[in-house]
Image: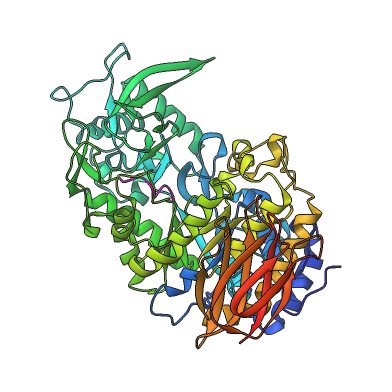
Amino acid sequence: MAILNQFNYYQIKPQDCLNIPFKQSFAMLQKILGQEKLDIAFDITHNYPSPLAGLKDTKWCKTAKIIGINPRLTKTFWGIVKYAMTFPENCIHIMPLWTTGDRGSLYVQTSWRLNDEFLAPELCEMGYKTPQQQLKLIVNVLHAMGKIVGFDALPHVDNFSEITLLNPSFFEWAKLNKQKTSQLFPPQVDYNTIYKEVENIIIKEISAPSNLYELNEQEKDKWIFPQNSNRTSIRIKLMEKIRYAGLEPLPVTEHAPMRPVMFKKIESAGDTNWAVFDVKDRSASAKVIGCITPYKWYKIDNNGYPLKNAAEQKVWYYFSGKISEFQREYNFDFLRADMAHNQISHSHNSADKNENEKQEMWSYLKDKISKEKPYFAVLAEAFYNTYYINGISDMINKKADIVLGNMNFQYLNKEYVDTIDDYLNPFRKNFPFYPCVCTFSNDGDLKEHSKYFQSEEADESRFFISMFLNLPSYTGIGYETKTLNPQKENEFSNEYVKIQDTPYEWGNNDILFEQITAMRVLYAQYKSVIEQAHLDLLSSDNESSLVWIYSIKNSPKLLFAVNLNPEKQSIRFNMPADIKDAKMIYTNSQYDEICADVQNKSFEIENIYIGECVVFELEA
């Protein structure tokens, strides 16, 4: 049986912990919480207080260590609790939990009902029989464990989702000619009123009153999806009627340019067919994601561009109401703004860009939730770089607190070091949001990205940097034991964003797990020192190395270094204060050769090879 360590978590591989029987895992949780906390957490008539309760701002997230969880890897809601018992990181992001559409993708939402795929049978036997009850329970338990918990907010839905059919006016539509060979344009159609044709088709098909779309959503739902009806078959039937009339919802697009979205052709396979759209004059990197459609945040001009000064207020009110209600019900502490890199208020065709936060949906949503929870933070799925027209001003407008960043898609070299320097200096000094040091994200865990994780040393260095830099970081579930150079599809967690026939194959990388375990213990041991200390990134003669110190009252206490340079085996640098002694307290080196030469302010680390990390305790 796993042993509870002094920092109140279990040093056990996640796959081994997930395989532990429910009763044993319940007993393990009881040891972490104690009976009193356990009893309070299991009373879902009340929300267990968040560890952030009472905070008046979002500063906490600027150093948050976030673990991303795909519930398909933990399999059940209770599996999320099991996994959370295996690490000291204080923050958990859970991927989307709503009912799914196309291929069961977690990011293709079809309704606001919770997905019952993750129900834990043992919790059902204890009386927690619905997804709502089990989600409330696990958030309570995670809060009792001292974890901060976040969810995914999706600014899009399945093309013909229940949400789409209940609210056609909240989405953009295209109308095709009778032959389905081309799209109709103004003045033949009005982009802002096409939805009325969709409404009329639905009203006629279900024999509903003509004022159906003046009713509230609950009443509309009773008409479109009568009690005990097969909601999926109704969706498909209505979809077929709408498409037969030549009406298609516009898909989500990514990367500039994103507009205008134009019908291209109808493709088919077997008995099914679908509309294909593209972006006019798009760049090579631009994408069209055909299975999802975005909310219509702004009115559209006759050229197919958003009117940034004409927000669709009903859509903003609807979406922000649903998300804030979800946050309130389950007592979440932050959200991940999915696809926040999309600059939805920019036309990409005009020099006049939106620089007004009041015209940004994510800002509007955050303000709504923050009125009750001032500590509520936004993690933007965004990268701030050339992906954008102007990513920095866009993140400021959206009031993002932290940004996912793209460090997991960078090689460990001088450019990587320069990015860290960029994060620590201009951002922390000049901007209200911080980029994360992203080790590995579950939706980015793809075979084509394996090139960034080619060696034990690379994987260890990434985690070391993310764990000990006083910046926010993000690591996805499964990284701890990730196999080097995996080849099979079921070894990549991105595949499990969608439903798969074969189970996820956990890695058995004992070397990586051993080093991550040691780093986590060190982090837990020195966490309080790091949080109260001042960080300085030091310059050295080895440009592809990272060296930083934590000082308290100008007295250096801890020094961290990692060498990313294959050409050099030493790092020489100057300290901001005299150092009497340096005691090595951690290294991932297999050779025990690393040593330090300390001459007052002059400091040299010798015999430190590429990928080797080291921590010194300093005496000034």
- Residue shown at 22% from the left, 20% from the top: 184
Q: Residue 453's x, y, as percent?
A: 65, 46
Please name whichever residue, 460 or 59, is drawn nearer the observer in this view of the structure. 460
- 55 in relation to 238, above or below: below
Q: Position of residue 23 (x, y in %)?
A: 80, 66
Image position of 257 with respect to 604: above or below: above
Quarter assignment of residue 587: bottom right
Q: Nearer the viewer, residue 197 or 394?
A: 394
Q: How many marks?
A: 0
Magenta span: predominant SS is loop
For the N terminus, give its image quadrant: bottom right
Name the colour scheme. Answer: rainbow
Residue at image position (27%, 40%) is 169
Q: Which residues are magenta?
A: 338-343
Residue at the location (34% across, 49% down)? 217
Q: Position of residue 454 (x, y in %)?
A: 68, 44
